[in-house]
Amino acid sequence: MLRRDFYLICVRPFITPCNNITMKLYLYAVIITLFISPVITNAQIHKMKPLNELINTKEPGWELVQKWIKAATNHIEVLPKDSARADHALYLTQVTTRSPMGAIIHETGGLLVDHGWIRVLGSGHEKLNRSLPAWNKGKSYTNEGEQPGFLLIADDVLGGFFAINAGGLSSQGIGSVFYFAPDNLEWENMEIGYSDFITFCCSGDLKQFYQDFRWTGWEDDVAKMSGTQGMSFFPFLFTKEGKDINNTSKKPVPVEELWTLQNEHTKDAGHH
């Protein structure tokens, strides 16, 4: 699905340079804390920080995220949060609200990008009825407090999944967002972090990114789908017969079903 030069075309122009030394040091610390610490076994569980240590009122990341959304060239729908659900999701994720990820989890039920084509996970909402930690449980980790090898952060209607790599997807690109492309069943390194992924969702060239995979009438089809659904295609997009998406049959199915099915196909195809 992705052109090998998509980073230069679609992503890099929308990355905001970070000139603040304090912010740079903070970002490095986050990467080291979350992604470069030694991989632990399932029996080794991190001590969970209490909620009050995760909520940062002095330097809230939500202000920065709001600026990205306000300047967005793509349509962004901010789903309202339920406070209790947001607190619980933030606690389970164990990231601070100073970070854009923590801010989105704690301040929103999630983000619907380009009229729902991409769904960025937050704390959950009736339109996107799954929180980031709930969606990851059983996929990237089993028990709360474990350090996962990756963290699912968003997905699209095609059954493509976005995840931060913590070593479980590749030994390269630790801390980078990877995209699972349903047309080749491979995790592809986008070479950007979470913050730049959000700015890409807001103002990136999604038409270029999905250049061959927007079928005629997709807007109407996506408008009828919930955030817990994805589109099932037959023939499958990773087959020769499925390369022309307009000639495939389409059916909304639970996104959980797409995750399971594509993982089975990945194993059958010998991908890692």
Image: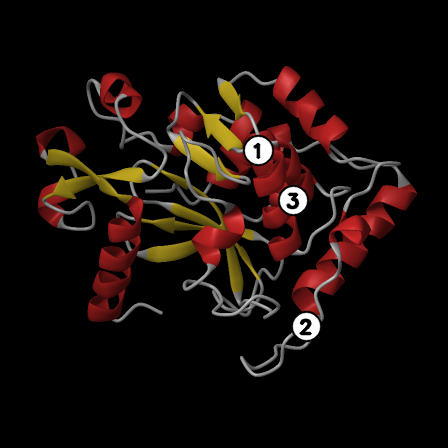
Q: Are marks 1 and 2 in contact (CB under 8 Å)?
A: no
Residue 191 place in picture, x, y as percent:
57, 49
Kindly identify the amino acid type of the residue bearing the numbered disc 2: His
Kindly identify the amino acid type of the residue bearing the numbered disc 1: Asp
Pick the front one: 140 or 138:
138
Provide the residue designation for mark 3. Answer: 87
**Residue 195 seen in the current view:** no
The circle drawn on residue 46 is 2
**Residue 207 seen in the current view:** yes
Q: Are marks 1 and 3 in contact (CB under 8 Å)?
A: no
Residue 48 place in picture, x, y as percent:
70, 65
Kindly identify the amino acid type of the residue bearing the numbered disc 3: Asp
Provide the residue designation for mark 1. Answer: 82
- Residue drawn at 30 percent across, 51 percent down: 256
- Residue drawn at 74 percent across, 63 percent down: 33
Residue 133 place in picture, x, y as percent:
52, 53
Q: State the CA–CA distance, disc 1 to disc 3.
A: 9 Å
- Residue drawn at 73 percent across, 43 percent down: 99
Pick the front one: 71 or 101:
101
* Mark closer to the chain start, 1 or 2: 2
**Is 93 above or below relative to 97?**
below
Quadrant in the picture for residue 128 = top left
* Mark closer to the chain start, 1 or 3: 1
* Mark closer to the chain start, 3 or 2: 2
Q: Secondary structure at mark 2?
A: loop
Q: State the CA–CA distance, disc 3 to disc 2.
A: 19 Å
Q: State the CA–CA distance, disc 1 to disc 2.
A: 27 Å
